[in-house]
Image: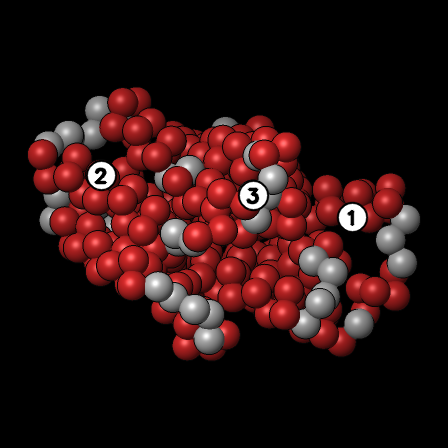
Amino acid sequence: MIFLILSILCSTSILLIFKFLDHLKINIFPPIVINYLIATIAGSLISLDNISVSGIYNSNWLYPAIIIGLMLIIMFFVMGWSTQKAGITVTIVAGRMSMVLPMVFSIIYYFEIVNFTKISGIILALIAVALTIYRNDLKKSYIKYLYLPIILFVGMGITDTLVKISQNDYVADSEFSLFATFVFSISAITGLIVSIIRKNNIKTFFNPKTLLFGILLGLVNYGSLLFFINALEFSGLDSSIVFGINNLAIVCLSVILAYIIFREKIRIINWIGVAVSLLAIAILNFA
């Protein structure tokens, strides 16, 4: 359970860092690229004894890792664009609701036990997410940009599903750290290539605030994936439950911290959503 808690804390920190970047009017592209470079370095230091080019090349998880690495950085940018064009509420709904895809996949593909308690927890989870992130401005979103949150929903769902498949079928327990490191290295290389194509001013990458937030983002980003993979393997819970608790807790904690740190206005319906989240977490934990 400790790995799941650490994954939740790291993932929530990512959202808070993006909030700080928006608050400070810092372009998100340089910190995102720096973040993947730092995550790769951190992972390399942790996996130093296991790093082998031939070992990676001959591993069963090489191609899934490449796809996940590409998907991660693409989804980071889609999240940014969707927030700006379609609205933050629709974006959060799409991102958190994506948990449905890996949960359903785990139940169908891995024949995880389905009972009334688990179904009730999943239904409560969906209701909790909707209530917690509800905003009156949902209808004001620009219809012509709704393809962005749709892409985010499908993309994040596919990414989480691929992580589950890799953890269950391809990655050995001793390779979790190496796997996460390689995934982030693919994201880092992709970000650098995009930077060159876009001809980004290299000076922007060395801005003190950009560097600071990029480094922080990289550390918690690496931790979120590594701890989540370990949670899937060692928590003792079904994958569908891990996905549900992870997403619910992130939403719940993000709302509370946004209220405390940024004094964001939270309506009564949002607090009801937080309460339902806690209930759903408890139900899923004992399903």
**Residue 271 percent location from the top left of the image:** 28, 63
**Residue 61 percent location from the top left of the image:** 51, 32
Q: What residue type is labelled 1?
A: Leu
**Vertical order, 144 against 43 (above or below):** above
**Residue 147 percent location from the top left of the image:** 59, 31
Residue at mark 2: 123
Quarter of the image for the C terminus: give it: top left
Q: Residue at x 74, y 60 (%)?
A: 27
Q: Can residue 183 be seen in this view?
A: no
Q: Which residue is drawn at 88% across and 66% down?
A: 203
2 or 3: mark nearer the eye: 3
Task: Identify the colour scheme used.
Answer: secondary structure
**Residue 74 percent location from the top left of the image:** 64, 40
Neighbourhood count class around disc 1 (C-alpha, 10 Å): few under 14, some 14–19, many 20 upward: some
Q: Which residue is drawn at 89% across and 58% down?
A: 201
* Outermost residue to the left: 116
The residue nearer to you, when weighing 232 against 132, is 132
Neighbourhood count class around disc 2 (C-alpha, 10 Å): few under 14, some 14–19, many 20 upward: few
Residue at mark 1: 192
The residue nearer to you, when weighing 140 against 256, is 140
Residue at mark 3: 141
**Vertical order, 16 against 40 (above or below):** below
* Mark 2 or 3, nearer chain start: 2
Q: Which amino acid does label 2 sit on?
A: Ile
